[in-house]
Amino acid sequence: MDDWDTVTKIGSKTHGGSSQKETVVRGKSALNAAQRSGAIVGTEKKFATGNIANKPGTEGQRLTKVDRSDDIIPVQKVNPEIGAAIRNRRSQEGPHKMTQAELAKKVNAQANDIKTLESGQAIKNQALLNKVARVLKISPKTGLPIEEGKK
């Protein structure tokens, strides 16, 4: 018999076969009874996302919490002391003396970013601060120079 000759019937009018109808059991006792009878038992985890439409109060509760938290959190800016330390280290005579543009080129940033970082007006960007500190060999937290042999 060829695959083209076989017909698969789907639905309630299919005859033949002694397959049991798939049912959903609710409760532990019905599940145990099905397992004792030797039936094939499959379990699926149902998630609560389908039931959320039936519970109308949850979204309002979440929005109420958001409304109650009206506190405006200020944006964290770079400590002006660190900005001054960067400016002083960059302008000192020695191997770290460079312009803002040269420093920006070394850390792959804009010269304006270095300018705002030094003035203390920049929004805290830890990645940029770490790069500048590595080039100038200063601590990104305190702005103090790091000794050459020490890490």
Image (spheres, rainbow, N blue to C red):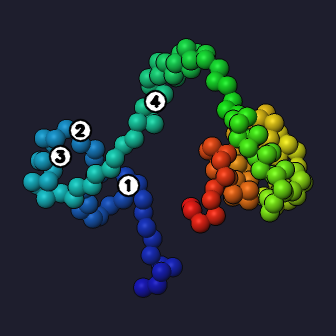
- Asked if the residue under mark 1 is in contact with the one under mark 3, i.e. CB atoms within 8 Å, the reply is no
| CA–CA distance in space, label 4 to label 3 | 26 Å
Q: Is residue 67 rendered to the left or right of residue 107?
A: left
State the residue lying farthest toward the left: 36
Which three-letter amino acid code belongs to the residue tagged 3?
Leu
Q: Earlier in the sequence, mark 4 or mark 3?
A: 3
> Where does the image place residue 136, in percent across and percent down from the top left?
74, 56
Tag 4 or tag 1, which sits nearer the N-term?
A: 1
Mark 2: amino acid: Arg
- Residue labelled with disc 2: 26
Residue 52: mark in rendering:
4
Residue 13's disc is: 1
Left or right: where 19 falls relative to 142: left
Q: Residue at x 40, y 41 (%)?
A: 47
Q: Quadrant of the N terminus?
A: bottom left
Position above or below: 139 against 122 = below
Mark with earlier residue (2, 1): 1
Q: With respect to residue 104, does 87 lie above or below?
A: above
Camera-side residue: 76 or 2?
A: 76
**Label 3, label 1: how far apart the Cα atoms are:** 28 Å
